[in-house]
Amino acid sequence: MGVENFDENEAVREYRAPTVHDHKYSRGIVGFATGSPTYPGAALLGIDGALATGIGMVRYVGPDEATRPLLVRRPEAVLGSGPASAWVIGSGMSDSDWESMNRARRALDEGKPTVVDAGALSLLPRAGYIVATPHAGEMAKVFGVPRELVEGAPAEYALLAASQWNATVVLKGSTTYIANQFGDELSVSLATPWLAIAGAGDVLGGVIGSIVASRAADIVLDQRVMARIAASAVVIHSLAARAASVGGPFLLEQLVAQIPVVIRNLLAQ
């Protein structure tokens, strides 16, 4: 069947814009069990990405090192456990950080559609509606191979991981490859090289989580749609980076500021 190139025209079909009948709960609630005392910023970046993408509510459970600045930065975030349509877990975590990983496990155990990143990848495979978001280094660690092997055959490794984890896999890179356990394969080649910066993947996790939460009911009905939903998030993230860059370096807050603009332009097509 081959790898399908996924672009703006495909992405707009997967984004659910609110209607006059929506309220904050019907738009979706995305929960975050992310960040750690060592990397609290990962939580803030992911939540920024989710809010900019458009979601009814963000819920956060995490360490004080992230909670305190979050209240100042994003006072609309709701703290503590409670209902969520979907979860984002693992960003900024190490699998040796017992307390943070325990929060991730509890979120995963809810069985909701879940974006699994960074340290929480060690919890896979797990039954449920999973989208895993490794970069090449993390993928290489999973399979015990040099990073160069993954970078030389990213589509193959994405598909292999999807089969092994029974999940949708987003293998991040200059071209991002998305595969699922059903054999669907997609690629997005819209990123700027300037996007290769620390924290960019945390923002992407938030973008994916936001769209997954807004489409949670569709995912439960047909898990196969997760791959196209994840690919649409990659498109939005890539286009926002290009708009922020304009051919040069940029700060992640500039990328986040461009996300609503990208979505507005996509919906206006």
Image (cartoon, helix red, strand yellow):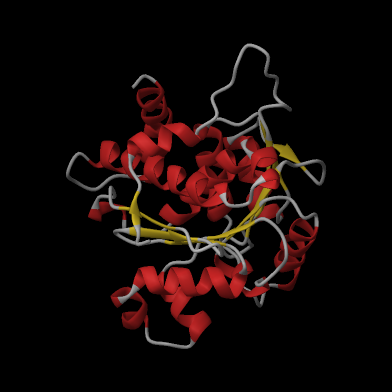
* Picture layout, residue 57 above or below residue 190: above
Query: x%, y% of residue 83?
Result: 80, 41
Query: x%, y% of residue 18?
Result: 58, 21
* Picture layout, residue 231 above or below residue 75: below
Counting every numbered tag in the picture gives: 0
- Residue at image location 51% in from the left, 52% down from the top: 227
Query: x%, y% of residue 171?
Result: 43, 64
Residue 212 in view of the camera: yes
In front: 222, or 119?
222
Residue 58 in view of the camera: no
- Residue at image location 57% in from the left, 36% down from the top: 73
Q: Quadrant of the N terminus?
A: bottom left
Query: x%, y% of residue 149?
Result: 33, 82
Farthest residue in the top direction? 20
In front: 239, or 268?
268
The answer to which quarter of the image holds residue 60 is top right
The answer to which quarter of the image holds residue 25 is top right
Q: Quadrant of the C terminus?
A: top left
Q: Is residue 218 left or right of residue 193?
A: right
* Picture layout, residue 129 above or below residue 135: above
- Residue at image location 37% in from the left, 77% down from the top: 150
Q: Is residue 226 left or right of residue 251?
A: right
In front: 92, or 126?
126
Farthest residue in the front direction? 1
